[in-house]
Amino acid sequence: MFGFPFAARPTRRRGFRLVGVALAIWASLGAVGHGGSAASLRARALCGPIALSPRSEAEARLFLDALDGRFGEHTLGEAAIVASRPTDPDACEEALSRLVALRSAAFTALGGEGKTPPAAEKSARRLLTWIHREGSLVDYDAAASDVVRTLCEGRFNCVTASVLYQELARELGIEAAAAQTPGHVWTVARFGDAWTHVQTTSPRGWDRLLAPGHVVASGSAANDLTLEWITDVELVAKIYYNRAILLAQAKDYSAAVEDARAGLTLSPGDPTAAANLAAIVNNWSLLAQAEGDYLLASALVLQGLAWFPEDETLQANDIFIHHSWACELARQGRYAGARQKLEAAVTRYPHEAALNEGLRWLERPCNFGTE
């Protein structure tokens, strides 16, 4: 009678929930911990092994332009349009035309205020109202990280609103850049020695601040948040990052991995983006295992570990998947195959009790079967 030691089956099967940081959709997803340490994720968020081949000539130019950590050939808005990956070339052209027209209209309406700090601040305040009432920001949509959609339909979130506000502010000669707090992207504008952080998702989102690195009061001292500078390249990377989360929620894991890798190609030092790539690969591997596709599950979890070898959650699921695969092969009487899977896993985890107990069971004389 078949007696593979199922009682020793690993119990550390772990699925991920995606971590939303500097995301417009963070609040709806929830932020949860990740099995790997922040230090290991930072260490492994390197462009080389994760970097993705561009999907189009325009994206290839974008990636090359961003190699030094800044855009030289693209404005922020133009880079965001490429990162939105419009599938219809006409939609891309329409978005670029609308961006040019928007810059012109903003300059015509607001460009006569002057260059002194008080005049520039007045222009910046007016721009925030103008972009909501007469510009492209019409309807807030937490999932609207696609700048093409923002320009053509008016739907926006904190990422796309920040992109367009900064694009137009710079057209007016206003010094503007992006900053983030957990779960949100802001614009920070400078007027002489004074700084203002701007909530671009609201026409009334104007507030004083000393500079990034200082706290944003949020109602109680315990909940104060610190603004952190992000570059234009890092801001554009969040377009890929947000889309990857939405695709993963829809279980389109292949496309989600592609977008997550594209985001890390632009912003290789983002530990939260790295955590989400690990999460997507992990969840995809567990779905494949649950559907009985052990070959795909194994390939995915091993790829995840090639990118993030110290990730404890991927390690736990590597053990779970390969132990489950060995169990299935043993059920079918394919003992040699079961031994092969366990032996390979034991080389990675020599002290894992469940794997070693399975091997000892298979080494019993009555179980030396062939395929």
Image: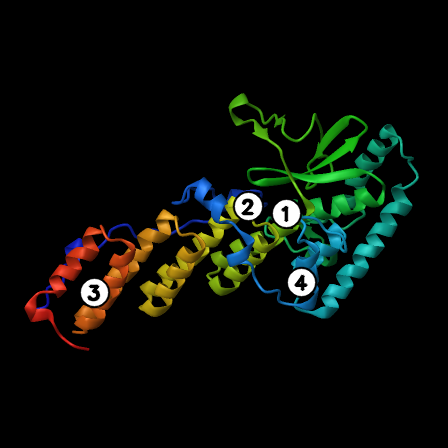
Please give the name of the residue rendered at 80% of the width and 46% of the height, measured from the top-left corner. Answer: 168
Sooner in the amino-acid sequence: mark 3 or mark 4: 4
Image quarter of the N terminus: bottom left
| Callout 2: SS | loop
Please give the name of the residue rendered at 62% of the width and 64% of the height, measured from the top-left corner. Answer: 54
Question: Residue 59: percent from the left, percent from the top?
Answer: 67, 63
Please give the name of the residue rendered at 40% of the width and 56% of the height, measured from the top-left corner. Answer: 305
Left or right, residue 174 beside residue 138: right
Sooner in the amino-acid sequence: mark 4 or mark 1: 4
Q: Which residue is mark 3?
A: 327
Q: What amino acid is at disc 4? A: Glu
Q: What amino acid is at disc 2? A: Asp
Q: Residues within 10 Å of mark 1 (few under 14, many from 20)?
A: many
The reply to whether the C-beta atoms of the residues labelled 1 and 2 are less than 8 Å apart is yes
Q: Which residue is mark 1?
A: 234
Sooner in the amino-acid sequence: mark 1 or mark 2: 1
Q: Which residue is mark 2?
A: 270
Q: Which residue reaches farthest top?
A: 221
Sooner in the amino-acid sequence: mark 1 or mark 3: 1
Q: Residues within 10 Å of mark 4 (few under 14, many from 20)?
A: some
Of the numbered discs in the image, which one, if any, rests on residue 59? 4
